Image (spheres, rainbow, N blue to C red):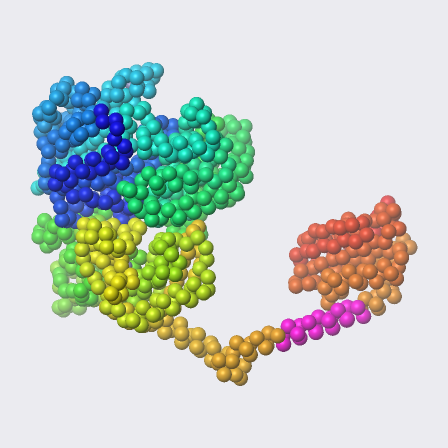
Amino acid sequence: MNKGLSGADIRQAFIDFFTQHGHTFVQSSSLVPGGDQTLLFTNAGMVQFKDVFLGTDKRGYTRAVNSQKCMRVAGKHNDLDDVGRDSIHHTFFEMLGNWSFGDYYKKEAIGWAWELLTERFGLSKEALWTTCFKDEKGEIAPDEEASQSWREQPGIDPAHILYFGRKENFWEMAETGPCGPCSEIHIDRGPEFCDKKDEPGHVCRVNGNCERYLELWNLVFIQYNRLSPTRLDPLPSCHVDTGMGLDRIVSVIQNVDSNYRTDLLMPLMTTVQKITGHSDAQREANLTPYRVIADHGRAASFLIADGVVPANTGRNYVCRMIIRRAARFGSKIGLNEPFLAKVAQTVIEAYSVAYPELKRNQTVILDNITREEERFQRTVQAGIDHLNESLDELKKSGNQVLDGQRAFDLYATLGLPFEITRDIAREQGLEVDEAGFRQAMEDHRLASGAGKAFGAMGGEDVDIYRGVLTDLQSRELLGVNGVTYDPYNAVEVEGPVLALIQDGQPVKQAMAGDSVEVFLPQACFYVESGGQVSDIGTIVSVQEPRWEIHVDEMRKPAAGVIIHVGHVIQGQPRVGDQAIATVDWQRRRDIMRNHTATHLLHAELHAILGDHARQAGSLVAPDRLRFDFNHPEGVTPAQLAAIEAGVNRTILENYRLTTITKSLQQAISEGAMALFGEKYGETVRTIRIGYPEPFSYELCGGTHVAETGDIGLFLITSEGSAAAGVRRIEAVTGRAAYELVQRRFKALDQTARLLAAPADDVPTKVNDLIDDLSAARKQTSAIRQELAGVEFSRQLDNVPQVSGVPVLALALPNADADTLRQMADRFRQRYPSGVVVLGSVVDNKPVLIAAVTEDLIKRGLHAGELIKAAAERIGGSGGGKPTLAQAGGKDPSRLSDALDQVVPFVQRKLKG
Ligand SMILES: [Zn+2]
Ligand SMILES: [Zn+2]
């Protein structure tokens, strides 16, 4: 075995081996899948090639090799539970793959796999086992072609070629669509690696589920198109899709018993060990926390590098959850201060050569992780205390499962993610109702108007659209690529209505007033993407009888399917009618101004704030643009002014935009900015602005103005926080900017007229007015105090006696708290023995002051107790010394009620 190879060497050797065999190296796509609403995260190498297999996307190559970033933490593929408990499961991992799109097939794929493993990597031929497909139902032909190819490999033991059925060796993307048999390579690491020796009934064998036989590599041969549960048609061209987990092959080549002992993950464990100061033995005694921290630290770094920062919902929730979970496991080994950034630093150093986005986003990654740990620390102890109380109650009640709503409350109020709640419950032998938690979270999101908490994860029923597409293709009404999409060169197209869909069913005809979805051979309406909203417009019949559909929205529910979603304004549209579709051009031009301005804003943010200010979200609508970007603090007014001025300067330069389609590789190497969550094919559209050096250079599929001057005017309308570490700017351009200026001018003119001053003098005039007003207020207040004094003096002559003691309870509505205290002093000067309680309303809040002379304290009177009794009536509380006390309250209307308590209170005390 070639034990000297590092993890990075092995990744590179895989890529080099296949590029030597004519494969094109394709960069990993983002962890945020572009254009696929059904996936939370990219979870396999296949995600970025899905459309190629479906035949709706074509690339400039037929052989590809890649190392894909993957996350499996949600949905069907959820490995989170196993992470940390064993040595082979991860949230984040890299998947190595080689791909043939209608090019080579089983013979080459198998031959190269064998050659790479045995010759380049030096694995023992005797230890390798392979599996081929044989249908247990006998409906699909056994894969003799693959097993024959295996038998031809030099040095292979024919007894090591096994057959398995559908579960292990038949791959399907979905219920219908491309599918085919697969062939796996396993390695026997020797009986000492079996971790299930003590399990009754365990048989140590391939697919026997223990760590002795490890699956290394899965070769998928896509040769059928499934049309129904019983019908498979052969595909016109066959494809190869392979996947090999990098951590695992590295653990085998480096001959270590765990992925965590490879040179990919061990340095992360060592970093943790340095922070804890543990010995090796202590580390081994705490393997679970160490593994969780290493795994989650790596995953969080990659997520944040791809723009997924910690927050409350969807992908961002996952990022928050794994950081908090790592922090909690850290506390189990004595790490109670933020530490995970140090682990992330190690990740960045180890992985940046293969994934330069880590280095580029270093500050953002480290800051976000530390801030999230700090946020968690503020509430974690309270959260765990509350949870433990709930768990104790649960045990007392004899129940086993904690209520989902309770788990959600712990998250919403004390920041305890569901997964941590479940960890803690399981440590005590209890469970948590996950469905209930999800439901509570969903209800909360809907109640707060924030949309779905987890996004569309189930996926809608796209089969109907695929069915219509296949039907149109089979009748040659549409080509292999489906509907032609070109929103750039025309705003009007003519063609026949190919299909109409209502309530998920194809119909021949629609009526006036109906909602309807329209298939045309071409679409020039922009389909919402990259933050730019869909176009609206009309579709009208060319011939009599006339009909008209208003298009409200555009959708792309499946590859090759673009539909106009609208409602019939008049007439009865029928399938086959010739029609003209026209984009609302005025609205579209507003959108184009906002989109180009978004690029200028993005570039200006980099220039003024720095390169970390990268796009984290964007909305390009007709009436405004909204731009979210990474930045740890508020943008200052001076920076904001500089940004706005910079964008307007570029507008006035009137640069011509250059739109060029080129290869992704070339665009990236020229420094074009790629955005998160966007799917990029082999060729990309680039937008350059500025001359001679581009001021802005982005990959972008949106629609833009021809020259920056078309934008007119750019005005920022707001700046604020969008999420932790993410700021949001909203702005207007063109017509909306003109309207804003108009509105502001009008308001200014009206104010100037009211002040009878020129518009330019309004600020000084208003300042003068404010000064005058506050002088007048002071004067009024002084007069009020005087009045209060006069009123008090009058009352001071007529103080009633209670059991021979003078007791005064009086409201002085005009006095402030200071005046009340002065008045209380005057009372005590006049009556060396007595009780006084004074009340007033200041800023709409009631206040009370009570004073008791020294001699009465011996007789059981206490100013603090007295005021407490009175303050209850005004919904307040208070206290103080036995001689002097003060209280505030909420309900000013009950002040006299409070004062009425004084005499009875004094009576009771003096009697008692
Ligand atoms: Zn075993
Ligand atoms: Zn753009």
Q: Residue at horizontal 70%, vertical 73%?
A: 780
Residue at image point 34% right, 28% down: 261
Q: Is residue 88 above or below residue 775?
A: above
Residue 650 seen: yes
Q: In the picture provided, is 540 more to the left or to the right than 807?
A: left
Residue 71 placement: quadrant: top left
The stretch drawn in magenta includes residue 773: yes
Q: Residue at x 87, y 47 (%)?
A: 859
Question: Is residue 232 highlighted in magenta?
Answer: no
Residue 121: x percent and y percent?
A: 20, 28
Q: Quadrant of the N terminus?
A: top left
- Compared with 708, 50 (above or below) is above
Q: Is residue 170 visible?
A: no
Q: Is residue 662 above or below residue 207?
A: below
Task: Find the magenta span and give its range.
Answer: 772-790
Considering the image in quadrants, where does the C terminus appear?
Answer: top right
Q: Position of residue 879 (x, y in %)?
A: 74, 50
